[in-house]
Image (cartoon, grey):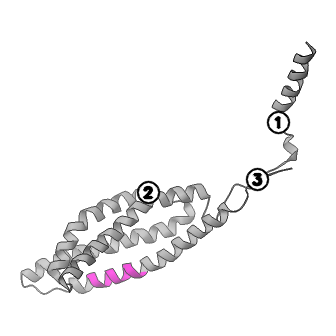
Amino acid sequence: MKLVILLIVPTLFYGCGQDPEKTVEQPTAQTQYGPPAKITAYLQTIGPLIRTVSQTEMAVQKQVNASGKATGENLSAAMQEVLPSLQEAFYTFDKIEPPPLLAPLHKDIKKIFVLRLDAYNQTIKGWKLEQAKEESDLYVQAEAKMKEANILSQKLNQEMAKIQQALISQTNTPSTTQQ
């Protein structure tokens, strides 16, 4: 009987836990962009959509490289081929709600989608007008939009690197300590 009581008493004390006043709580883990879990989830959600943008651009460049020069005909053909996947990625992206502190980044990514979609559609329309022997400045407009999208993409790549670095830095920081 004494043995049973000796075993029960320590078990009861063990189950009581620590004194809450001796626990030092640190604030919830944060980065300058928000909680790491939300940032990571957002980046994982948009990652495949951003890859779609890159893949469509690579497919267009591959077509140009195969022929040796960019023409309305070969650009239009390549852009018509990838346009549905780019549109689908945009529609999916547009439904995503970004973490509040990443809203400006989200807006800029959306702008890249819109610029590329506009440029692709203008190129396709420009080729149709060229075939009909009609004059148009659609190629010039499309080229300007692609240039703007490329410049914005470079800026966003730098911003994404900063976000990744913030997540890495936060991962290396302890969040709670016990006294």
Q: Circle 2 is placed at which residue position?
A: 96
Q: Is residue 20 above or below residue 112?
A: above
Q: Circle 3 is placed at which residue position?
A: 176
Q: Nearer the viewer, residue 158 or 8?
A: 8
Q: Where does the image place residue 146, in percent across and percent down from the top left?
A: 32, 80
Asked whether, in this view, residue 55 is left or right of residue 130, the answer is: right
Crowd tier of the residue under label 3, counting other residues whose Cα lies within 10 Å: few below 14, some 14–19, many 20 or above = few
Per the rendered image, the range of residues in magenta is 142-151
Q: Where does the image place residue 65, in percent across and percent down from the top left?
A: 24, 81
Mark 1 lies on a secondary structure that is loop
Asked whether, in this view, residue 135 is left or right of residue 46, the answer is: left
Q: Is residue 40 above or below residue 82?
A: above
Name which quarter of the figure residue 13 lies in. top right
Q: CA distance from mark 2 to mark 3?
A: 32 Å
Judged from this view, the residue extending furthest toward the top is 1
Mark 2 or mark 1, which has the lower sequence index?
1
User: Disc 2 residue type?
Assistant: Ile
Q: CA distance from mark 3 to mark 1?
A: 17 Å
Is residue 97 shown to the viewer in this render? no
Q: Residue at the location (51% across, 77% down)? A: 158
Mark 2 or mark 3, which has the lower sequence index?
2
Mark 3 or mark 1, which has the lower sequence index?
1
Q: CA distance from mark 2 to mark 1?
A: 42 Å
Q: Quadrant of the N terminus?
A: top right
Name which quarter of the figure residue 8 lies in. top right
Q: Where does the image place residue 144, in percent across and percent down from the top left?
A: 31, 85
Q: Residue at the location (84% across, 39% down)? A: 18
Q: Residue at the location (35% across, 83% down)? A: 147
Q: Circle 1 is placed at which residue position?
A: 17
